[in-house]
Amino acid sequence: MQATLSARCIRPAAARPAARRGRLQVCAATHNITVLPGDGIGPEITKVALKALTAAGKAEGEDFVYTEAPIGGAAIDATGDPYPASTEEVCKAADAVLLACIGGYKWDSLPNAQRPEKGLLRLRSSLNAFANLRPAVVLPQLADASTLKREVVEGVDILIVRELVGGIYFGEPRGFKEENGERVGYNTMVYRESEVERIARVAFDAAMKRGKRLCSVEKSNVLEVSQLWKDVVIRVAQDYPEVELSHMYIDNAAMQLIRNPKYFDVVVTGNIFGDILSDEASMLTGSLGMLPSASISEPGKPGIYEPVHGSAPDIAGQDKANPLAMVLSAAMMCRYGLNLPKVADRLEAAVTAALDAGYRTGDIMQPGCKQPRPSAGRHPSGSPMVASGPPSRQSSPLIDASMRPPPRSGRPAPSRRPVLAAAAAFVCLLVVLMRGHQQSAELQRRPIDADVEKNPFDARHAGQQAANVRGGSTVQQQHEEQAAAAGGKQAHSVVAQRGDKQPQPDDEPTPEALRGVQPPKKPGKLAQQKAAVAAAQQEAAEEEAQQAEQQQAQEQQQQQGGDGQGGSDGSGEGGEGGSGEEEGPTGGWSDSFLKQKADAHLGNLLDLTSQMSPLRTCAADGFSLEVQEREAEDLLADAIEGRPELTEAQQRWARYVAPEPTLVSGTAHNLPCAARRSGGTCCSQPVSFRRNTTDYRVFKQVFQCHYMRYLYTLFGDQPPKYILDAGANAGFSTILFKLLWPEAKVVMLEPDPSNFAILSRNTARLENVHPINAGLWGRTANITVKANHGNWGKVFQEAEEGQSGMPAYSVADVAKKAGVPAFDFVKIDIEGAEGQVFAPGRDVSWIKQARAVSLELHDFFADYFGLKRGEISSRVDAAFSPTGYTPVSDNEHIIYLNPELQASVSQLHAPPPKLVAIRTARLKKISGC
Ligand SMILES: NC(=O)C1=CN([C@@H]2O[C@H](COP(=O)(O)OP(=O)(O)OC[C@H]3O[C@@H](n4cnc5c(N)ncnc54)[C@H](O)[C@@H]3O)[C@@H](O)[C@H]2O)C=CC1
Ligand SMILES: CC(C)CC(=O)C(=O)O
């Protein structure tokens, strides 16, 4: 069935082993390629690729022996089996397998196991080709070929790493059955840890060689298999601290790939998601006909090299197929499978040069492309010529292009042969390539409209043609203009490593890029959006200035021996907003005698810890916020309509807190996280803020100013497992906890419905978090609001009997409710209710189970609880005194450490005395808080 052929001879497969031996005597460097042309356009594009490969190999002194075998529909027709044993045998024996594509209408009604697609799956499985590398690179020549705008796609260079032999395509059980009188079809999506780990390692390795950014795509918000995927990827990330890892759900990834493809560097994902995403990515490059792939197996087994596309039965046999994905797959084979980088270089250069010369198949046809005519003679090299015209015009664009060194950027230097010889070989290669186009396509002579008429795939070009303002210039001209504009920057290789590439200004996602917002040409929605963003940024800047002023005033006050009354430091999660204008009692955290006590212990050392923390550099460098504004109706809907059980009063709070129903959403970058500790990068996180609230300020405090940032140092190598975030407000502390300790379970308590809504939104993407819309109290009770403080704080009281309200729980009850054995880190910031939690007679046995308890004290709310000034602090002090826990101080919080933690912190910072002098005020200055 198969045949062995080379540039010179064809041998029957039966005689192959002997033939191979025989050939070895003849050829110095022989590479045995099993070629599977498959179905549909497969044979057409295979022909082109083999010609190009042979020519490129010849130019580099490499010889290829091709053993052709049937697969897919062709194999079904010949043997009844889509992957016959004889094909499997020659694939396994090969140095590499070059596959075109399989499938077609003819076999569509066969049972699954007998379909052509099954043959392809069996091939991949039999070679254990688990790592499918699918580069999606937008070549400069094709930046206008995509249906997306040039600004969106230009410079895109993504590597999709798709797991290829697992997941739902292979999972068992699968099939059909009958249930309750109807047919049911079912499949199983399954991944083992080992399968995820090996593909993750391939992806991390690839990221290390490129832009060091890896995005893992899954659906862990719904699928257990994806949760496992994510867990394993996070675990493997520990070994690649330099790689910035992000996670994205597949639905979002599909959207982001179109919205801002330049965000992506390497994407790792499972079988089905990778299949879909790579087809989508192909349209960034102009056409499915442009995307090659390499499917790598374990060492010693041949890889499979195949274009991403299918058999395109709609255009098969009509001379329309784009062969470039197949040629580029052959290049990947040479680069990765056969270690022939020079041959790969030649093939890639041939592709770019052919495009430079203006040649296009229908799928990537653009206005102004050259329409070459049939060959009229022979090039001095002896190769047939592609370009036409009078002899004087023999320097056609194709020949011109081929006479120049191919555009390489950072690639290994081309062959050092004499220039003319190299050029001649290169011309030969291009010519072969172009002849392939011509012989099989003749597309260049066909008017664009003819293609459009025949092929709906091309229809978009008609529209594009009309829309293209550059329609008058040729692709060559466009390329030249573009090269000039880019300062002579040339095309980069299709499979170029990121490190090889000229740095692109937009490699890093800018706010605009992330939002996918291009500079608006005329005022419209985008302009409005941009103005809104500018306003939000302005607002943030003003807020920052205001904070600085407040801080200055406070410091002055402190220096003047102020009594701590009459305002606050303007900080605290959901805490004292700092204007001093709020109704009710005044005063700040610093007036607590506990604060002085804590300061006397290790407070200054904790300041020092903060200075030393690897996390600090993230905060010190400053997080960046990329803002995207959106309406918050849905937030209110979540908070109100979605919660019919809320009383009218509660609904009012929700409205009150977001009087202008506007959310500012975006992504915060440069946040401290676990990866940072081991020298890795800082992390990013989507966040939303309500306008006219303290949300943004609180966010900054959590990530820039607070004790939070050295918590990691505090817990060292034994991170907390169960965390209580009481007074979770908008969820920012929980976000930080999860960034620092991804494995921890965090239980969030937040009684305010509007806070709870934004908190739910902000923490929705985090795993293992447990939000509870309730307050923390000394015992299980109903609570109602006692007083509002501006838009930042609410003081609660126990509800009267029969009065409705929000639930509130003791720490022990929360633990039970959330199924937590005991909290080992407790954060409490509950607007004075801490006086209730630590009231005499309350169960505080949970303290001893926690390794650290962080408290914000609100003595200035004592009046509301009918307590004397200072009594809240006294209650806290009384509860902790018998425990042997040491209070240490942050500028706003008191953290009680158990003796073990205290010892490790003290030891960690066995005093270099001069450093001990660093005080809170200094820390504030240093961190810009
Ligand atoms: N790796 C493989 O062999 C794959 C095989 N298939 C099989 O291919 C058959 C057709 O499936 P479709 O969903 O239509 O996907 P497809 O990838 O074959 O075609 C999708 C569209 O892209 C166009 N297209 C694809 N490759 C092209 C090229 N090189 N040049 C110009 N246009 C090109 C086609 O004309 C069609 O309009 C099915 O039997 C399917 O199972 C599908 C995907 C992958
Ligand atoms: C045809 C299927 C077996 C697989 C597929 O669509 C692909 O791998 O691209």
Image: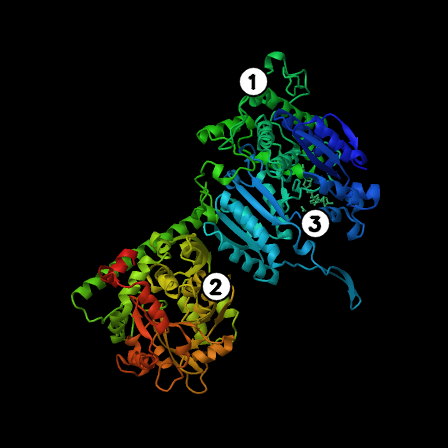
Q: Is mark 3 within 8 Å of ligand 2?
A: no
Seen in the picture, residue 378 relative to 155 is either above or below; the reply is above
Q: Which is nearer the eye, 365 or 287?
A: 287
Query: Disc 1 marks which amino acid?
Result: Leu
Q: Residue at x 44, y 60 (%)?
A: 739
Displayed-image quarter of ligand 1? top right
**The label number, if any, that marks residue 763 in the structure image:** 2
Q: Vertically, is 901 above or below 619?
A: below
Amino acid residing under circle 3? Ser
Return the mark for residue 574: none
Element marked by disc 3: helix
Query: In the image shown, does 347 or 337 lie closer to the viewer?
Result: 337
Question: In the rendered picture of this protein, how many numbered marks are placed on residues?
Answer: 3
The percent coordinates of residue 788 (x first, y second) are: 35, 73
Q: Earlier in the sequence, mark 1 or mark 2?
A: 1
Q: Is mark 1 within 8 Å of ligand 1?
A: no
Mark on residue 125?
3
